[in-house]
Image (cartoon, grey):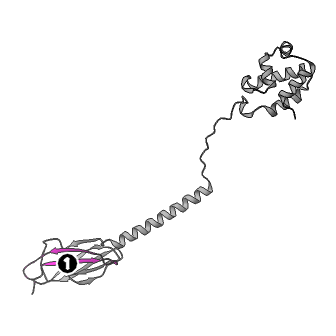
Amino acid sequence: MKTIGQLLKDAREAKGYSLIKMENITKIKLDFIDAIENEKWDRLPAFPTILGFVKNLSAALSIDDKTAVAILKRDYPPKKLNINPKPDIKTKFSWSPKLTFVVGIIVVVVLFFGYLTFQYIQFISPPALNVDSPKQGQTISGNSVLVFGTTDIDSKITVNNQPILIDENGKFSTNINITSTTNDIDVIATSRSGKVSEIKRTIRVGQGTSN
Protein backbone atom coordinates (compact mmCIF):
# COMPACT_ATOMS: atom_id res chain seq x y z
CA MET A 1 0.00 0.00 0.00
CA LYS A 2 1.35 3.38 -1.01
CA THR A 3 2.24 6.01 1.51
CA ILE A 4 1.02 9.58 1.15
CA GLY A 5 4.44 10.65 -0.18
CA GLN A 6 4.50 7.90 -2.78
CA LEU A 7 0.92 8.62 -3.84
CA LEU A 8 1.59 12.32 -4.47
CA LYS A 9 4.95 11.75 -6.12
CA ASP A 10 3.65 9.04 -8.48
CA ALA A 11 0.69 11.22 -9.46
CA ARG A 12 2.95 14.22 -10.11
CA GLU A 13 5.38 12.21 -12.23
CA ALA A 14 2.49 10.60 -14.13
CA LYS A 15 1.35 14.09 -15.16
CA GLY A 16 4.91 15.07 -16.00
CA TYR A 17 4.93 17.90 -13.46
CA SER A 18 8.18 19.06 -11.93
CA LEU A 19 8.42 20.27 -8.35
CA ILE A 20 8.77 23.82 -9.66
CA LYS A 21 5.56 23.50 -11.67
CA MET A 22 3.74 22.12 -8.64
CA GLU A 23 4.98 25.09 -6.67
CA ASN A 24 3.57 27.46 -9.30
CA ILE A 25 0.22 25.61 -9.45
CA THR A 26 -0.39 25.21 -5.70
CA LYS A 27 1.62 28.18 -4.38
CA ILE A 28 3.21 25.74 -1.92
CA LYS A 29 6.94 26.10 -1.48
CA LEU A 30 8.98 23.57 -3.39
CA ASP A 31 10.82 22.51 -0.23
CA PHE A 32 7.51 21.69 1.45
CA ILE A 33 6.30 19.62 -1.50
CA ASP A 34 9.58 17.71 -1.54
CA ALA A 35 9.37 17.13 2.22
CA ILE A 36 5.83 15.75 1.91
CA GLU A 37 6.77 13.41 -0.94
CA ASN A 38 9.75 12.12 1.08
CA GLU A 39 7.78 12.22 4.33
CA LYS A 40 10.30 14.43 6.11
CA TRP A 41 7.84 15.58 8.73
CA ASP A 42 10.43 17.45 10.77
CA ARG A 43 10.93 19.86 7.85
CA LEU A 44 7.25 20.73 7.73
CA PRO A 45 4.91 23.03 9.69
CA ALA A 46 2.24 21.81 12.09
CA PHE A 47 -0.15 19.04 11.07
CA PRO A 48 -3.14 21.30 10.20
CA THR A 49 -0.92 23.14 7.69
CA ILE A 50 0.32 19.85 6.21
CA LEU A 51 -3.30 18.74 5.90
CA GLY A 52 -4.06 21.85 3.83
CA PHE A 53 -1.00 21.23 1.63
CA VAL A 54 -2.08 17.64 0.91
CA LYS A 55 -5.59 18.74 -0.05
CA ASN A 56 -4.20 21.36 -2.46
CA LEU A 57 -1.73 18.90 -3.98
CA SER A 58 -4.43 16.26 -4.34
CA ALA A 59 -6.71 18.71 -6.15
CA ALA A 60 -3.90 19.70 -8.54
CA LEU A 61 -3.05 16.05 -9.25
CA SER A 62 -6.69 14.85 -9.56
CA ILE A 63 -6.43 12.64 -6.44
CA ASP A 64 -9.48 12.09 -4.28
CA ASP A 65 -8.81 14.37 -1.30
CA LYS A 66 -10.64 12.11 1.16
CA THR A 67 -8.39 9.21 0.20
CA ALA A 68 -5.29 11.39 0.44
CA VAL A 69 -6.32 12.75 3.85
CA ALA A 70 -7.01 9.23 5.16
CA ILE A 71 -3.57 8.02 4.03
CA LEU A 72 -1.91 11.10 5.54
CA LYS A 73 -3.52 10.48 8.91
CA ARG A 74 -2.43 6.86 8.73
CA ASP A 75 1.19 7.72 7.90
CA TYR A 76 1.72 10.86 9.95
CA PRO A 77 3.64 10.02 13.18
CA PRO A 78 1.30 10.44 16.20
CA LYS A 79 4.15 11.85 18.29
CA LYS A 80 4.46 14.71 15.80
CA LEU A 81 0.81 15.70 15.86
CA ASN A 82 0.45 19.25 17.10
CA ILE A 83 -2.62 18.57 19.17
CA ASN A 84 -3.12 20.04 22.59
CA PRO A 85 -2.19 17.25 24.99
CA LYS A 86 -4.50 16.30 27.78
CA PRO A 87 -3.51 18.16 30.91
CA ASP A 88 -1.96 16.14 33.65
CA ILE A 89 -4.67 15.15 36.03
CA LYS A 90 -3.52 14.34 39.52
CA THR A 91 -5.12 11.29 40.93
CA LYS A 92 -7.57 12.36 43.60
CA PHE A 93 -7.48 10.45 46.85
CA SER A 94 -10.65 8.50 47.48
CA TRP A 95 -11.56 6.49 50.55
CA SER A 96 -12.57 3.04 49.35
CA PRO A 97 -14.13 0.10 51.22
CA LYS A 98 -10.89 -1.81 50.67
CA LEU A 99 -8.90 0.96 52.35
CA THR A 100 -11.38 1.00 55.22
CA PHE A 101 -10.88 -2.74 55.68
CA VAL A 102 -7.08 -2.44 55.61
CA VAL A 103 -7.08 0.47 58.07
CA GLY A 104 -9.46 -1.44 60.33
CA ILE A 105 -7.18 -4.48 60.36
CA ILE A 106 -4.16 -2.29 61.15
CA VAL A 107 -6.00 -0.59 64.03
CA VAL A 108 -7.08 -3.95 65.48
CA VAL A 109 -3.55 -5.35 65.22
CA VAL A 110 -2.05 -2.24 66.84
CA LEU A 111 -4.59 -2.33 69.68
CA PHE A 112 -4.07 -6.06 70.19
CA PHE A 113 -0.30 -5.83 70.43
CA GLY A 114 -0.60 -2.66 72.48
CA TYR A 115 -2.81 -4.53 74.95
CA LEU A 116 -0.38 -7.44 75.10
CA THR A 117 2.51 -5.05 75.68
CA PHE A 118 0.60 -3.28 78.46
CA GLN A 119 -0.26 -6.58 80.13
CA TYR A 120 3.34 -7.77 79.87
CA ILE A 121 4.67 -4.56 81.41
CA GLN A 122 2.09 -4.84 84.18
CA PHE A 123 3.07 -8.47 84.74
CA ILE A 124 6.81 -7.83 85.10
CA SER A 125 6.48 -4.58 87.07
CA PRO A 126 6.26 -4.36 90.87
CA PRO A 127 2.71 -3.66 92.05
CA ALA A 128 1.62 -0.17 92.98
CA LEU A 129 1.52 0.41 96.71
CA ASN A 130 0.39 3.36 98.77
CA VAL A 131 0.11 3.37 102.55
CA ASP A 132 -2.10 6.14 103.94
CA SER A 133 -1.82 5.07 107.57
CA PRO A 134 0.21 5.04 109.66
CA LYS A 135 2.38 8.00 108.77
CA GLN A 136 6.13 7.90 109.16
CA GLY A 137 7.08 8.61 112.79
CA GLN A 138 3.42 8.61 113.94
CA THR A 139 2.86 8.12 117.67
CA ILE A 140 0.39 5.33 118.39
CA SER A 141 -1.60 5.07 121.63
CA GLY A 142 -3.33 1.83 122.54
CA ASN A 143 -2.74 -1.80 121.64
CA SER A 144 -3.37 -1.62 117.89
CA VAL A 145 -2.68 0.55 114.87
CA LEU A 146 -4.94 1.07 111.86
CA VAL A 147 -3.16 0.28 108.61
CA PHE A 148 -4.82 1.13 105.29
CA GLY A 149 -3.89 2.05 101.74
CA THR A 150 -4.22 0.93 98.13
CA THR A 151 -2.51 -1.50 95.77
CA ASP A 152 -3.21 -3.42 92.55
CA ILE A 153 -6.35 -5.54 92.83
CA ASP A 154 -4.53 -8.74 91.84
CA SER A 155 -1.73 -8.30 94.39
CA LYS A 156 -1.32 -9.92 97.78
CA ILE A 157 -0.81 -7.75 100.85
CA THR A 158 0.88 -8.60 104.13
CA VAL A 159 1.28 -6.26 107.09
CA ASN A 160 3.96 -7.41 109.52
CA ASN A 161 3.67 -10.86 107.84
CA GLN A 162 -0.11 -10.99 108.33
CA PRO A 163 -2.16 -11.51 105.09
CA ILE A 164 -4.70 -8.75 104.46
CA LEU A 165 -7.74 -8.83 102.17
CA ILE A 166 -8.00 -6.39 99.23
CA ASP A 167 -11.38 -5.16 97.97
CA GLU A 168 -12.47 -4.78 94.32
CA ASN A 169 -11.00 -1.27 94.22
CA GLY A 170 -7.56 -2.31 95.45
CA LYS A 171 -8.10 -0.89 98.92
CA PHE A 172 -6.96 -2.67 102.08
CA SER A 173 -7.49 -1.93 105.77
CA THR A 174 -6.70 -3.76 108.99
CA ASN A 175 -5.87 -3.25 112.65
CA ILE A 176 -2.51 -4.62 113.71
CA ASN A 177 -1.84 -5.43 117.36
CA ILE A 178 1.24 -3.71 118.70
CA THR A 179 3.27 -3.76 121.90
CA SER A 180 5.67 -1.35 123.51
CA THR A 181 8.47 -3.01 121.56
CA THR A 182 6.84 -2.55 118.15
CA ASN A 183 8.87 -0.09 116.12
CA ASP A 184 7.90 -0.71 112.48
CA ILE A 185 4.87 -1.43 110.36
CA ASP A 186 6.03 -3.36 107.27
CA VAL A 187 3.59 -3.44 104.35
CA ILE A 188 4.46 -5.71 101.42
CA ALA A 189 2.56 -6.06 98.14
CA THR A 190 3.39 -9.06 95.92
CA SER A 191 2.28 -9.30 92.26
CA ARG A 192 1.26 -12.46 90.41
CA SER A 193 4.75 -12.61 88.86
CA GLY A 194 6.38 -12.42 92.31
CA LYS A 195 7.45 -8.79 92.04
CA VAL A 196 7.45 -7.00 95.38
CA SER A 197 6.73 -3.46 96.55
CA GLU A 198 7.46 -2.66 100.21
CA ILE A 199 6.75 0.31 102.44
CA LYS A 200 8.04 0.34 105.99
CA ARG A 201 6.77 2.94 108.43
CA THR A 202 8.51 3.62 111.75
CA ILE A 203 6.07 4.31 114.59
CA ARG A 204 6.30 5.43 118.18
CA VAL A 205 4.34 3.53 120.73
CA GLY A 206 2.91 5.80 123.42
CA GLN A 207 2.56 5.10 127.11
CA GLY A 208 -0.29 2.89 128.12
CA THR A 209 0.46 0.23 125.52
CA SER A 210 0.64 -3.20 127.13
CA ASN A 211 3.57 -5.52 126.68
Measured from the top left, where is residue 135 in percent x and y? 17, 71
Query: With 172 as the anchor, is 96 left or right in this view?
Result: right
Any magenta on residue 199?
yes
Q: Residue at x 9, y 83 (%)?
A: 181
Identify the residue at horizontal 65%, vertical 35% (top origin): 87
Quadrant position of the N terminus in the picture: top right
- Residue 101, position in %: x, y? 59, 60
- Residue 123 x, y percent position in the rendering: 36, 73
Q: Which residues are magenta?
A: 183-209
Please tell me whether residue 130 is drawn above or below residue 2 in the rendered image: below
Closer to us: 173 or 208: 173
Q: Dividing the picture into quarters, in which one does residue 46 lie?
A: top right
* Residue at point 89%, 19% (across, down): 60
Q: Which residue is mark 1?
A: 186
Question: Which quadrant: the C terminus?
Answer: bottom left
How busy is the neighbourhood of tag 1: few (under 14 within 10 Å), some, or many (20 plus)?
some
Q: Nearer the viewer, residue 8 or 141?
A: 8
Decide if residue 192 is on the left or right side of residue 52. Answer: left
Residue 164 in the image: above or below residue 69: below
| Image position of 83 with respect to 184: above or below | above
Image location (x, y in percent) of residue 89: 63, 39
SS at circle 1: strand
Let me know if residue 173 is in the magenta part: no
Query: Left or right of 112: which side holds 91?
Result: right
Q: Amino acid at mark 1?
A: Asp
- Name the residue at the top extreme: 24
Give the number of callouts: 1
Q: Is residue 163 left or right of residue 39?
A: left
Q: Looking at this view, name the residue that lies furthest to the left.
A: 207
